[in-house]
Each structure stands twice: as C-alpha cells, then as structure tokens.
Image: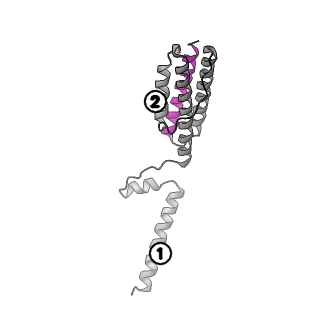
C-alpha cells in the first residue's frame, strides 16, 4: 500500500506538470517544450485551412472545366497553355475532387473570350482574398502566387481577341 506522503507527493507533482503544460499551451510554447525534451513536434493543419483548400479546389476545378469547354468550342483560340496552367493550379490545391458541370461556352468568340477574362479575374481576386485569410504562411504563399498567375492569365486571354 502507498503511503499518504507518497500519494500527496505524486499528486502534487502531477498537478505541477499539468499546470506547466497548461501554461505552455496558453503561451503557445508547447512546441518549444517538446523540442527541449527531444521530441520533434508535427504541425497539424488548421481546420479553417482545410475548408479553404476544399473550396479553392472546387473553384479551380470549375475554372478548369470552363476553360476546357471553351477550348473545345473555339479550337482556334489555342487555349492549351491555359488548360496546362489551370491544371497545375488545381493540382496545387489537391487536384480534381470532382468535375463540375459547366454550361457550354458562348458561341461567339469575343463573348467566350470576355467570359474567360472575367472568370480568370474573379478567380484572381478570390485567391488574393483567400491568401489573406489563410492561417498557414505556406498556404498563403501558394494562394498569393496562384492569384498572380490567374491575373496574368486574364491579361493573356484578353489578348486573344
């Protein structure tokens, strides 16, 4: 049987360790504490970033489907490079989760180009806003870079008129 002193000492030590861990958690120092005792912490993704990535992937897949539909309808526009770029963007945020149904591209070439320019411009603005709301600095960099690339695509598609 354990003595009363040993029981109280163990309880006090447990309470001190729990208080220390609680203080480290509140002070956002748990990773530092883990490194001190020889444990390499593994960062967990923020749930808000996970939801953001899923939404961005869906948006990028919709944009890719729109570009592909326009490329099929207007073969003379030579949209292959934009399909390649948009495919890379979709892969950067997790690849194609689903292929969305997209309305047919406009029959008029100028209208189709204008629709693509608007889609790229909106996607660029959306990715810039997403970069600002991302928790992870690495994700923010990817989204900001994607926003810049989408803006460049909007300009380049606009030059196809």
Please name whichever residue, 81 or 48, is drawn nearer the observer in this view of the structure: 81
Residue 63, image quadrant: top right
Residue displayed at 48% across by 69% down: 16
For the C terminus, give its image quadrant.
Answer: top right
Under tag 1, what secondary structure? helix
Q: Earlier in the sequence, mark 1 or mark 2?
A: 1
Please name whichever residue, 3 or 40, is drawn nearer the observer in this view of the structure: 40
Counting from the top left corner in percent of width and height, residue 23 is at 52, 61
Q: Is residue 142 magenta?
A: yes
Residue displayed at 63% across by 15% down: 108
Residue displayed at 49% across by 33% down: 90
For the N terminus, give its image quadrant.
Answer: bottom left
Please name whichever residue, 10 or 155, is drawn nearer the observer in this view of the structure: 155
Counting from the top left corner in percent of width and height, residue 25 is at 51, 58
1 or 2: mark nearer the eye: 2
Vertical comparison of 146 with 98: above or below: above
Q: Is residue 86 magenta?
A: no
Vertical comparison of 23 with 105: above or below: below
Q: CA distance from mark 1 to mark 2?
A: 56 Å
Please name whichever residue, 39 or 50, is drawn nearer the observer in this view of the structure: 50
| Local crowd size for mark 2, using a 10 Å CA cut-off: few (<14), some (14–19), many (≥20) | some
Label disc, if present, on residue 143 of the rendered structure: none
Q: Which residue is mark 2?
A: 88
Residue displayed at 53% across by 55% down: 27
Counting from the top left corner in percent of width and height, residue 160 is at 56, 13
* Drawn side of residue 102 relative to residue 9, left or right: right
Identify the magenta region.
137-161
Under tag 2, what secondary structure? helix
Q: Which residue is mark 1?
A: 12
């Amino acid at each position: 049987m354990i003595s009363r002193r040993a029981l109280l000492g163990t309880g006090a030590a447990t309470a001190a360790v729990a208080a220390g861990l609680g203080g480290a958690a509140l002070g956002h120092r748990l990773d530092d504490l883990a490194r001190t005792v020889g444990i390499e912490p593994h960062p967990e993704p923020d749930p808000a970033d996970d939801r953001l990535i899923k939404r961005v992937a869906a948006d990028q897949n919709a944009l890719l489907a729109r570009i592909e539909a326009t490329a099929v309808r207007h073969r003379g526009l030579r949209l292959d490079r934009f399909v390649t770029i948009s495919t890379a963007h979709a892969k950067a945020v997790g690849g194609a989760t689903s292929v969305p149904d997209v309305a047919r591209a406009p029959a008029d070439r100028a209208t189709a180009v204008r629709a693509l320019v608007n889609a790229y411009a909106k996607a660029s603005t959306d990715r810039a806003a997403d970069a600002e709301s991302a928790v992870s600095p690495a994700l923010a960099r990817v989204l900001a870079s994607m926003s810049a690339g989408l803006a460049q695509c909007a300009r380049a598609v606009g030059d196809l008129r």
